[in-house]
Image (cartoon, helix red, strand yellow):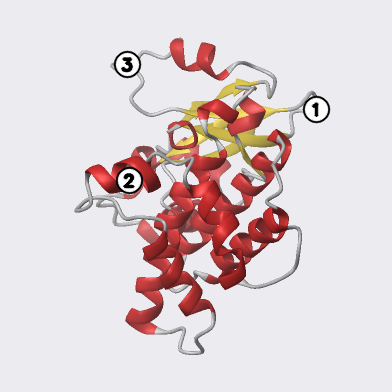
Amino acid sequence: MTHTLSWDERLHHRDQLRAARYAALADAEGFHEVCYALEALGLRLSQRKAHLGRYREPIAALAMQSVVLSDLSGRFPDRFGTFESPYEQVRVARNDAMHTGAYARHATSAAIELCIGLEEALMNEQQMPRRKIKDCMVRMPVSVEPWQPVAQTRQLMLTHSFSFVPVFADRWKLVSETSMARYLLGREDWPTRLAMPISEAVTHGLVLVDARVVDAADEVEALVAAIDPMKEPQTLWLVVDGHERLTGVLSAFELM
């Protein structure tokens, strides 16, 4: 008998799958994290320790709550795959010792596709009693310190495809990808600019924008409704506690 996940359990496994997907995106051969997240989900659903082959049935039942993995895969088979194909690729790769090169990259692509579908299933509208920011935000976010070199922020952006990186400079601000590009592009003193601390770089053209700070208990719909997409095409909200500590971030990606 398949265990019925509570809302908090759904959030927990959604976060695990999302973190694993981000890890896989950062490493073309990094599907192992996805395997671990799938095994944790399968263990919870089946209530017994086994392997991905035994976990197929309960995870497949959950996958049917995903529009992408169920309805759209049938209506647009040339665009969307079923649950079975990526799951089998990941299962086989999990048990194969040859986790290198094109083989591993192909498995990682299947793992990412599977994560996207299962994350959607876990956040299925019919199972969604809450729509607070805390239900959607990315926990344990990455940020930088003003004393750290610009090169570190640039490295984070390029490694993880970040559009913004938070930095606390008297109050929470954001380093944007466009600001970083303008600061570095065509500069003869490129090495000096990369080595410069962020706090010093702001006096040499690195623009920091004020961050939108929100509370974890705020309603997501009200937050999004207040945004004018024509004026603010890119938005990252920072979730901060009462001590100015960054506890999470929220972008449009987490709401799709």
> Which-is-in-front pick, marks 1 and 2?
1
Q: Position of residue 126 (x, y in %)?
A: 54, 26
**Mark 2 — residue?**
181
**Mark 1 — residue?**
243
Q: Residue furthest front?
A: 1
Q: Position of residue 194 (x, y in %)?
A: 45, 56
Secondary element type, mark 1? loop
Is 21 or 200 nearer to us in this picture?
21
Specify which label sits upstream in the sequence, 1 or 2. 2
Q: Residue furthest bottom?
A: 97
**Which residue is at 31% across, 55% downward?**
81
**Mark 3 — residue?**
231
Which residue type does callout 3 highlight? Answer: Lys
**Which residue is at 62% across, 25% downward?**
133
Secondary element type, mark 2? helix
Is 43 or 151 nearer to us in this picture?
43
Tag 1: Cα neighbours inside 10 Å, few (<14), some, or many (≥20)? Answer: few
> Which-is-in-front pick, marks 2 and 3?
3
The answer to whether residue 196 is visible is: no
Which residue type does callout 2 highlight? Answer: Ala
